[in-house]
Each structure stands twice: as C-alpha cells, then as structure tokens.
Image (spheres, rainbow, N blue to C red):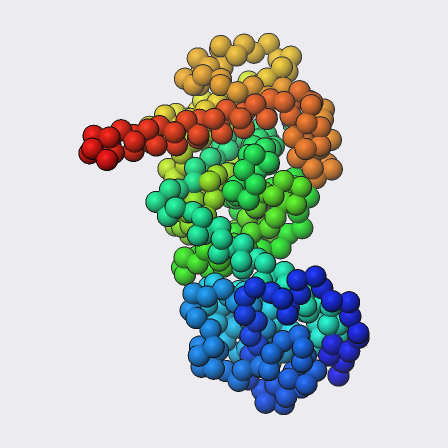
C-alpha cells in the first residue's frame, strides 16, 4: 500500500487551500474515505460519501474542483465518474489513484476527469493538480461568460482534392498566426481522421482526440469539450487532434464532426479545420459548414488537373463558390505553369501564393510551425500575410455587422 501524501511538501503558490472555487472530495468506500480523511487532511476536505451528498454540496452550474477517491478507478467507478462529470459541467474533476497506468489514464479522461494523480506522488502533486484544474475551470467559465452566445466564430477549412499539396502546412500556420493575434480565441481541428498529422506538425503529443470529442458531443458540453483540446504553448492555439489509430476515425460520423465544429464556434473566434485529401461525407459536411474554404493547390500540372476535375465532379463551385479562396502553394516552382493559366483552369483567382521554401520541410521535421520557426522566411511571410488577410476580412465582416446594428438602432430612433 502506497503512503498517501507522506512527504513534507513546499506549498504550491495559490494551491488547493487558496483556490477560488470550492474543493470537494467524494469516496464511496468507507474504509478509503476514512483513510483519505486522515491522510489527505489539509489538502482536500473530508470526502463525501456519494453523489447525493455531492449534489447537496455543489451547485449544478457552479465552478468547483471535485477530487474523486481511488474507488472510482474501477469499471463501475468510471461509469459513475462519467455521470458526475456530465452532471456538473462547470466542475473540474481530479481522480486520485494508487498507481497510474496508460489504460487507466485513458479511461479516466474518457470519463471526463481532467487530471489523475497517484497517491504516492506526494502532497505537492495533488495540490498542484487541484490548483491547475481550478484554474482551467475558472478560465473556461470566464471564456464562456465572455462569449456572446449569438456571435459565432468563423470556420476556415483547408481543402484540396489532392494529397501532399500543403493543406496541413497552410492550416497549422494560419491557425498559429491567428492565435498569436487572438490569444486563446483560435482552435485548430484535425479532420483528417485517418492520417491527420496536425499534432506532429505542432510537436504536440497525441492525447485527447476527435474520437473522444465525438463520444462526448451529445451532451453539447463546452467545458467537457474544452478539456479535450490540447494547447500549443508557444502560440496559445487550442487543438483537437485526429485519432492516433487510423481505423478508429471511421467511427466518427459527419454529423458528429459538424456538431463538434458548431460547439467550437460558440467557444472560439476562429475554428480552423485541416481536411483529408480524399472526398467523403465528413469533408462535404465541413465544406458546407465553412465560412471560408482555402483551396490549396501546388503548382504542378497533376495537382491543378486533379483540382479542376475535383471542382467539376464535386460541383464545388455550387457547394462553396463564394467561399472559395485559392492558395497556390510552391508558387515559385519552376514548372512552366503560368498563374493566369491556373486561374483560368480552376475558375478561381489565385488570391494567395506561398513560395516553395526549404524552410518549410525543415520546420515540419522539427515539429515547429514555420511562422514561429523561421518567421522571416519567404514561406512564413506569405503565410503570415494570408492569416492577416483572413483576419482582416473577419474583422471587416464584424465591423459591417456592427455598422448594420448601429444603422438599425439609428432607424429605430435609439
Ligand atoms: N511551400 C512549401 N515549400 C516547400 N515544401 C513544402 C511547402 N508546402 C508544403 N511543403 C512540404 O510538402 C509536404 C506536404 O505538405 P502537407 O503535409 O502540408 O500536405 P497535405 O496536403 O496536408 O498532405 P496530405 O494530403 O497528406 O494531408 C510537407 O512535408 C511539407 O514540408
Ligand atoms: Mg495533411
């Protein structure tokens, strides 16, 4: 049996005791409860015995940190934990266990628990976890309070009918560049459910994915979804990664993807989506949901031909005509292709051109987006300009709707 909170620890600044939300604990097993009361005294309050006692102590929409005791780390326990995390979306849950292993961690996170701490990790680790979860809960509450429910974020997708043309380079760098301008207000979704590599391009470890988000989406719970997003520390970009196992992506329906994106657009100003190269109902649904479709083509004849056929067969111009913005990637490649020929072939103006640049694969291999890795390189400058233009058109649109609001108010004599 591991010693609980045995070692003397430095106090964590703003630790459990000073967290702004109430901290509660629950442990149904009486022996464990007594043990927790004695050994975790001063870190967590005496545990409550069950969900009913928790219901009396916590408001359904109040932010709080709830520490679940080790008897929740069983199949029935995880089911009970899941019910609690669903019932109290504004609370952040920490599970304490005897020992952590990967399957346990996965089950806990699937149950909506935000953090798992091994009892043997010591007092400081538990205090830190309670503190971090408390902060995340407070941040989520502030974020959602700040969002005007009627104002939705813009959905930008990076799309092509051909593989390897630079969709993911464009979407990750666009998202990072936007996130630098709008900290905490941008999310990137990897909708390449089989072979998504956004996590790799950003150097993020694969943790929670679209799969968990699809499983949780029926509750339309923003706090829960927020807990499934990774954070790209260098830019503050939030990221929903693709499943690590290519087979499991099949289980995510187009409806679930659209629901995820709709919920994300209530939480963020920009939802950037990286797409798979092939065409399926997920891609079609997201093209319809999008506000802007960045059509990425590389400057080679097969790519342009493929895209032209794709545009015709999908009747893309009728699905997404006014939303299409062409990004010519590797636009300086010496291939005897004229930009105007490309525009004519595709029926879309080449609004953005990103040069071929050795710094791109170098940044890709480092897992650092080029706009951060080599911000003054030709490709990064082009991608930053692309982000600025997209950002500018977003603000113009908001400004226009404000003007309209003002105009209507004036007409009403307000
Ligand atoms: N402007 C560029 N200059 C040089 N290399 C580039 C450029 N854009 C992309 N690449 C390289 O091309 C490769 C493919 O890019 P990326 O992964 O973004 O394509 P994709 O369209 O997302 O591919 P997939 O269809 O497989 O998802 C990357 O390894 C990247 O390094
Ligand atoms: Mg890709």
- Compared with 314, 328 (above or below) is above
- Compared with 299, 216 (above or below) is below
- Compared with 266, 372 (above or below) is above
In-image side of 259 versus 368 (left or right): left
Q: Position of residue 226 (x, y in %)?
A: 52, 54
Quarter of the rendering occupied by the N terminus: bottom right
Is residue 166 shown to the viewer in this render? yes
Quarter of the rendering occupied by the C terminus: top left
Q: Nearer the viewer, residue 388 or 380?
A: 388
Which residue sits furthest front?
Answer: 414
Q: Position of residue 304 (x, y in %)?
A: 51, 20
Residue depicted at 33% across the width and 28% down the height = 403
Q: Nearer the viewer, residue 169 or 272?
A: 272
Residue depicted at 49% across the width and 32% down the height = 159
Q: Quadrant of residue 345?
A: top left
- Compared with 177, 128 (above or below) is below
Q: Position of residue 398 (x, y in %)?
A: 39, 32
Q: Position of residue 52 (x, y in %)?
A: 45, 81
Q: Nearer the viewer, residue 184 or 163?
A: 184
Residue depicted at 53% across the width and 84% down the height = 49
Which residue sits furthest right?
Answer: 7
């Amino acid at each position: 049996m591991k010693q609980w909170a045995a070692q003397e620890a430095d106090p964590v600044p703003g630790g459990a005791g000073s967290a702004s939300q109430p901290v509660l604990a629950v442990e149904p097993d009486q022996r464990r409860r007594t043990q927790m009361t004695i050994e975790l005294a001063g870190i967590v309050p005496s545990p409550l015995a069950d969900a009913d006692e928790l219901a009396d102590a916590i408001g359904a929409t109040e932010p709080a940190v709830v520490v679940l005791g080790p008897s929740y780390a069983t199949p029935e326990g995880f089911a009970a934990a899941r019910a609690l995390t669903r019932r109290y979306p504004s609370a952040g849950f920490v599970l304490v266990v005897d020992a952590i292993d990967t399957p346990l961690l996965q089950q806990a996170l699937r149950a909506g628990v935000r953090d798992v701490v091994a009892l043997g990790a010591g007092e400081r680790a538990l205090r830190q976890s309670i503190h971090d979860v408390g902060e995340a809960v407070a941040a989520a509450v502030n974020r959602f309070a700040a969002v005007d429910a009627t104002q939705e974020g813009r959905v930008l997708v990076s799309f092509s009918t051909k593989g390897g043309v630079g969709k993911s380079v464009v979407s990750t760098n666009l998202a990072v560049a936007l996130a630098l301008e709008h900290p905490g207000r941008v999310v990137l979704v990897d909708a390449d459910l089989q072979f998504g590599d956004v996590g790799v391009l950003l150097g993020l470890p694969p943790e929670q994915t679209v799969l968990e988000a699809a499983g949780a989406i029926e509750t339309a719970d923003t706090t829960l979804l927020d807990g499934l997003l990774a954070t790209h520390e260098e830019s503050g970009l939030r990221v929903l990664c693709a499943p690590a196992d290519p087979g499991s992506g099949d289980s995510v329906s187009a409806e679930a993807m659209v629901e995820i994106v709709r919920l994300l657009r209530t939480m963020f100003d920009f939802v950037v989506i990286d797409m798979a190269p092939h065409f399926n109902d997920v891609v079609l649904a997201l093209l319809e949901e999008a506000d802007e479709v960045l059509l990425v083509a590389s400057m080679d004849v097969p790519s342009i031909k493929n895209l032209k056929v794709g545009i015709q067969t999908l009747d893309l111009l009728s699905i997404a005509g006014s939303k299409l913005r062409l990004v010519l990637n590797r636009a300086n490649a010496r291939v005897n292709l004229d930009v105007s020929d490309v525009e004519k072939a595709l029926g879309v103006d080449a609004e953005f051109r990103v040069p071929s640049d050795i710094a791109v694969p170098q940044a890709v291999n480092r897992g650092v987006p080029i706009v951060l890795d080599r911000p003054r390189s030709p490709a990064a400058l082009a991608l930053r300009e692309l982000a600025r233009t997209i950002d500018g058109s977003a603000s113009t649109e908001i400004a226009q709707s404000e003007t309209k609001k003002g105009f209507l108010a004036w007409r009403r004599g307000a």
